[in-house]
Amino acid sequence: MDKIKIIESQFAKKDHPDFSVGDTVKILTRIPEGKDKFRLHPFEGVVISKEGSGIKEHFTIRKVSYGEGIERVFPLNSPSIERIELIRSGKVKRAKLYYLRSKFGKRATKIASSESKE
């Protein structure tokens, strides 16, 4: 076996749920508040892309907050991610949902039906 794959298998987290592009997820990240204290900060949105493999896998989450779109890229095996919760599964026909950047309101949240009408 390749030495790189052995090292990657030791550091890979396997307790995350299986999610794909189009799913709505909630990411709870650890934010340090003091020397031995931290708090969990939630970030809930739609997965618009997943890239990479193994320990280098990362995904992009998009949410709209106060009318402003926010995107954040998370490495899947980051130690700052406490847990990932799957809120809702989506049904999409594309691998990347970058077209959601121009949508807002119901058109951005109804992923499965809006794609077939475009």
Image (cartoon, grey):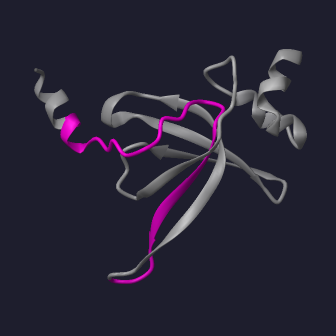
Q: Where in the figure is residue 9, as x and y percent of width and height?
A: 21, 35
Number of marks in picture: 0
Q: Where in the figure is residue 17, as x and y percent of width and height?
A: 47, 41
Q: Is residue 21 left or right of residue 56?
A: right
Residue 115: quadrant of the picture: top right
Q: Nearer the viewer, residue 31 or 109?
A: 109
Q: 18 above or below 11?
A: above
Q: 111 above or below 10?
A: above
Residue 79: quadrant of the picture: bottom left
Q: Is residue 116 left or right of residue 35?
A: right
Tell me which segment is drawn in magenta. Answer: 8-35
Q: Where in the figure is residue 61, as x and y percent of width and height?
A: 61, 43
Residue 53: quadrant of the picture: top left
Q: 102 above or below 92?
A: below
- Residue shown at 56% from the left, 31% from the top: 20
- On the rendered image, what quadrant is the N terminus found in? top left
Q: Where in the figure is residue 62, as x and y percent of width and height?
A: 67, 44
- Residue shown at 49% from the left, 46% from the top: 74
- Residue shown at 89% from the left, 17% from the top: 117
- Residue shown at 32% from the left, 44% from the top: 13
